[in-house]
Image (tube, grey):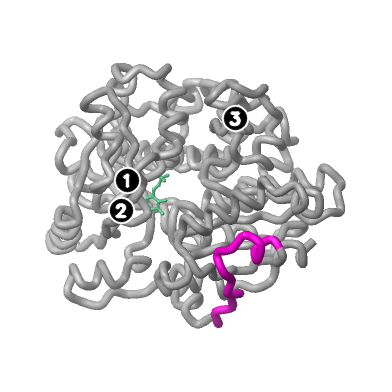
Amino acid sequence: MKYYSTNHKTSPVALAEAVKKGLAPDKGLYMPEKIARLPEKFFENIGDLNFHDIATTVATAFFGEDIPAGDLKKIVCDTLSFDTPVVNVHDNIFSLELFHGPTLAFKDVGGRFMARMLSYFIRQNGSRRKVTVIVATSGDTGSAVANGFLGVEGIDVIVLYPEGKVSEIQEKQFTTLGRNITALEIAGNFDDCQRLVKSAFMDKELNGMLTLTSANSINVARFLPQAFYYFNAFAQLQRKGVAKNVVFCVPSGNFGNITAGLIALKMGLPVKRFIAANNRNDVFLEYLQTGVYTPRASVQTIANAMDVGDPSNFARVMDLYGNSVEAVRKDISGCRYTDEDIRQTIAEVYDKYGYILDPHGACGYQGLADNLRPDETGIFLETAHPAKFKDTVESILGKDMEIPAKLQEFMKGEKKSIRMSADFEDFKDYLKTRA
Ligand SMILES: *Cc1c(COP(=O)(O)O)cnc(C)c1O
């Protein structure tokens, strides 16, 4: 199957190329040419299927023409080495816990899938040359990508992160791994890191010496697999006997996660509607209200993975809905929460129901608490484990929380990074040594 650019200024490309390139040359985002509707029978009995079988069916709809069934199933099953359980918080509100992967956030699914798919294409290609994945991170992306690619043959990963600007937990998750993962600690901010990555992709000399690839979240191999857990969540609701009038509420930043849900909807998943939950970065809510999209600089909040002022996947939402705000409104509504709201939600839900939310999931929960009707089943995406935001959450709860063993393991590891200036020539010289 071919993938076209949302800007329509370049020709559609094959899957392997879309995965290697990430962004289309006209700066658009790649979209699959076909979004197949799955047969109704699949949904009638989905509760009888396990996560691997459900995900394999969904993956086949996208990648089945390009990757043989056996290889694809292996990629899917290796990716999903953990479950995405649905937990009842109270009444008709459920949490879809996406934090049971190696780095305790939903980005593990896309990161692990992309690593395995890229590795498959490299082997297919028969090329002996290593592929170098370079990725800039402000925290969570680096850990999901680094852990996803850890030990994957034929691929080197270089993570660039701003010195002193990521939390200790986040830093440990990509600086302690070793093997094929290298962390560069840049004397600058996140924008500097991103600039260095972009400059490297544009540098002719470097591209002649190395095969560079981006693992940006807009990559189709990171984006599409996120649809898997929407189907798996529905299956679990069906087993619980509450799969009617299902409403998904998605804490959103770059809008990749919710867009994968919209793709699931297009494939026939019986979802009634979606809610996009924002923090104070609410350009999408404003778009729903006014019909005008006005990107702006992001503001810092305690749900920092949602601090995005110009969500890149907005282009995909527009593409799916033919640029019609009326059409978007039929499927998606929005809501917005301040840091104060988020704190209150975390405190209240813990007090009343004993469930600990992270700041992102708190926006998702509150979006349901404020908008769900009694005849609906609401399910919010709990996008990260609360312990990843330990200081924030503990200060709200007024007590220490348990740190999962996986996170403690990372904390024990020894940080190894290479310090570097934010000057492109330094970065380039370093990359040359890796050729
Ligand atoms: C990345 C992230 C989000 C935002 O997801 P998008 O796909 O960018 O909308 C929400 N919560 C957490 C914990 C994240 O890491």
Callout in the foreground (3, 2): 3
Numbered disc 2: secondary structure: helix
Above/below status of 221 relative to 411: above
Quick one: SS at disc 3?
loop
Q: Which mark is residue 96?
A: none
The numbered dot on residue 26 is 3
User: What residue did someone put label 1 on?
Assistant: 251
Q: Is mark 3 within 8 Å of ligand 1?
A: no
Per the model, the C-alpha gap separating discs 2 and 1 is 6 Å
**Cβ(mark 1) to ligand 1 < 8 Å?**
yes
Q: Amino acid at mark 1?
A: Pro
Q: Is residue 215 left or right of residue 105?
A: right
Identify the amino acid type marked 2.
His
The answer to which of marks 3 and 2 sits earlier in the sequence is 3
Nearest the viewer among 379 and 281 is 281
Question: x, y (%) of residue 203?
Answer: 70, 49
Left or right of residue 309: residue 53: right
Q: Is residue 421 magenta?
A: yes
